[in-house]
Image: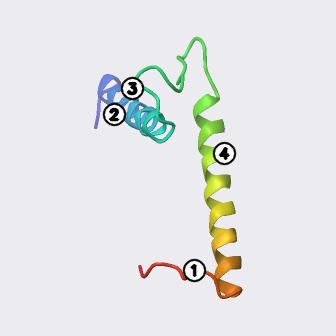
Amino acid sequence: MKTEMERRIYYQSIVHAVCTALDLVDGKRLGNGIVCGTADEPSTAVQQRIATLANEVLALRAANETLTLRGGPEKPDA
């Protein structure tokens, strides 16, 4: 069984990776983009940005489906 410290380090590394990925997607310099917050000062910026990106992806997929149905550009083979 993991110690509390090992568990915290594990989850902290996940949060760091997510924040780094969001900074890369948004073209920000690493460490100067999204604010993850702390236990004392939580932030919802990460959750909000992920939700925004998910909605953007869904909109792009819907637009691509519409183009394909109208005979526009085909989807790339998976």
* Residue located at (52% from left, 24% from top): 36
Q: Quadrant of residue 29?
A: top left
Of label 1 and label 4, which has the lower sequence position?
A: 4
- Compared to residue 30, the image places residue 58 above or below, namely below
On the rendered structure, is 62 left or right of 9? Answer: right
Please state the horizontal and vertical placement of residue 37, each as a whole percent of the image.
55, 19
The residues bearing labels 1 and 4 have C-alpha atoms spaced at a distance of 25 Å
- Front of the two marks 2 and 3: 3
SS at badge 3? loop
Of label 4 and label 2, which has the lower sequence position?
A: 2
Please state the horizontal and vertical placement of residue 56, each as a whole percent of the image.
65, 54
* Residue located at (62% from left, 29% from top): 45
- Front of the two marks 1 and 3: 1
Of label 1 and label 3, which has the lower sequence position?
A: 3
The residues bearing labels 4 and 2 have C-alpha atoms spaced at a distance of 26 Å
Task: Name the mark on residue 30.
Answer: 3
- Closest to the observer, 49 or 3: 49
Tell me, yes or no, whether the two marked residues, 2 and 1, touch with CB atoms within 8 Å: no
Q: Residue flagged by tag 4: what amino acid is it?
A: Thr
